[in-house]
Amino acid sequence: MRRNLLRSLREYKKHSMLGPLFAGLESAFDIIVPTFMAYLIDFGISRSDMSAVLKYGLLLVLCAFATMALGFLAGRSTAIAAAGLGKNLRRDIFRKVQTFSFSTIDQFSTASIITRLTTDVANVQNAFQMTIRIGARAPIMLCFALVFAFRTSVRLSLIFLGVIVILAIGLYLVIKNVHPVFVRVFKRYDKLNNIVQENLLGIRVVKSYTRESHENSKFDGISMLISQDFMKAGIILSRIAPLMMFCLYLSTTLLAWLGAKEIVGSGNNPALGLTAGQLTSLVTYTMQILMSLMLLSNVFIFFLISRASVERIAEVLETTSSLQNGEHPLCEVPDGSVIFEDVSFSYSPESEKPALDHINLSIPSGAVVGVLGGTGSSKSTLVQLIPRLYDVVSGRVMVGGIDVRAYDIASLRDQVSVVLQKNQLFSGTVRENLRWGNEKATDEEIIRACQLAQADAFIRAMPDGYDTYIERGGTNVSGGQRQRLCIARALLKNPKILIFDDSTSAVDTKTDRRIRQGMREAIPGTTKIIISQRVASVQDADMIIVMDDGRVSACGTHDDLMKTSEIYREVFDSQNRGGLLHVS
């Protein structure tokens, strides 16, 4: 297991060390039992010596109790250590993902991250428990059993060495063939989870278009591939058990045949050769050696299953976010001014064409700025550079006169609040969702923010008002209500820059106008950037930016653009043709 995964043990290190210690002591007592049994037969039963029978019988009972107690302690410690490792790994992966930038998250699909948090962590947890419990006990038992067997009879113990070689070759071949199967199967698990997640999130669309049969066939296809992979892996792994039984019967037969010849030849005299008690102990050692090898093979199986999981978890933990704080990051944002200096940006280094191409803009603090443009004109990309959700490829973005890369990321984002068109609400009450913007917000502040966002009226009309429970994703409120709640949540942050990324698209024009008017009056010092498809939403802005194909096509007030920008004029005319105002 990789070292960085073992760091997740932390407070469970003590249990992870006690488990193998107790398992090793348990093995030691197991090894002593055959020797005492041989003494019981040779010195007690064969000589009809009851004192020897009682002596060695009592020692056998004590060994049995010691083995039971140590086995319990070993099992308890390993269970605690493995469960603790699983808990810490899940926490470490989740916290690591929280530090990722958007571009880093794009490297992993959501379904893949969920698989790593659940299935992969469970595999590693089981493998770790097996390793520190049986992986510690089996080698100790194997080594001591071999030592005691050779001490009893060197010639007969050579049988064990031959058996070990046969098993080692068999296990190597199994490992070599089964590992690629498990690597492939976990990638298919990612795809399976992605299909399920996509289906559940879009279940309304699936049902609207009656595509259930199509979704079923997609699921059945990937599920069948996973099943076939596990069948193949199971067939390969199933070869271990017959090989183990063959070695067991072969070694037992050879021991019985050769041992019997020695006993007959020596007349059961320990001075001349092998005794019946020693042969009995050798047979027991045979069982212990082969049992150890069988346990080790099980450890190998768990190791094989978890190896791919270890690599997948380590990939997340070892990934560094593409966005990092500098050595001495600034924590104070002076004001809400925004400057783009010759900014270019691409989502991928392989992209032939940049998403933003040589952008130059200057937005004064407190201004109301509209951003207009067609689908794919990179309006959202432009504003995502302000809170440093992505980093520019060239040029620089400045907030408050300072390059955004010089700020502490958390401090910058606390002062730049973004409301998306499809913003997310979380399971919990209305009040709890709003306090995402400010955990310490008072009820008065919450109500004031909701009034500005035109959300207070419909919240009060809900059955429990501000204590009404919101389902995950806000499925029990309408699109317009969800957007207004998200606007109120953003207002509670009291940011220096407030960005609306088409976040009033589901709101009627009258409510949209009230929201904009309320913010202009209530937070005049906050820079407000409004992305919209509706000219009416940006018409009264201090500055309107017209985006076209990743470039700034025009910039100015409504009156200026009506004279100088053909794109703006066409959009305005199309939306106001016949006196109607609608979403283009």
Image (cartoon, rainbow, N blue to C red):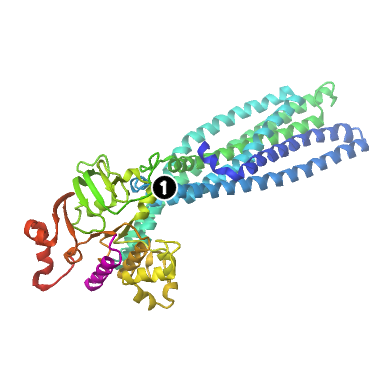
Q: Amino acid at mark 1?
A: Thr
Which residue is label 1 attached to? 99
Residues shaded magenta: 507-525
Answer whether residue 330 is magenta in the image: no
Q: Quadrant of residue 183?
A: top left
User: Element under label 1?
Assistant: helix
User: How many marks do you count on the picture?
Assistant: 1
Of 205 and 142, the residue lying toward us = 205
Q: Is residue 153 visible?
A: yes
Give the vertical position of 469 relative to 29 (above or below): below
Question: Percent from the top left, x then y, of residue 60?
Answer: 82, 40
Question: Percent from the top left, x then y, of residue 199?
Answer: 36, 60
Answer whether residue 514 is magenta in the image: yes
The residue at 26%/46% (across/down) is 397
Question: Percent from the top left, x then y, of residue 70?
Answer: 73, 43
Question: Percent from the top left, x then y, of residue 314?
Answer: 46, 40
* Residue 564 as seen in the image, left or right of residue 143: left
* Residue 449 as seen in the image, left or right of residue 262: left
The residue at 52%/36% (across/down) is 3
Q: Is residue 225 visible?
A: no
**Magenta-drawn stretch, dominant element (helix, strand or loop):** helix
Of 298 and 533, the residue lying toward us = 533
Give the vertical position of 399 relative to 299 (above or below): below
Q: Quadrant of the C terminus?
A: bottom left
The residue at 36%/43% (across/down) is 323
The residue at 66%/39% (across/down) is 20
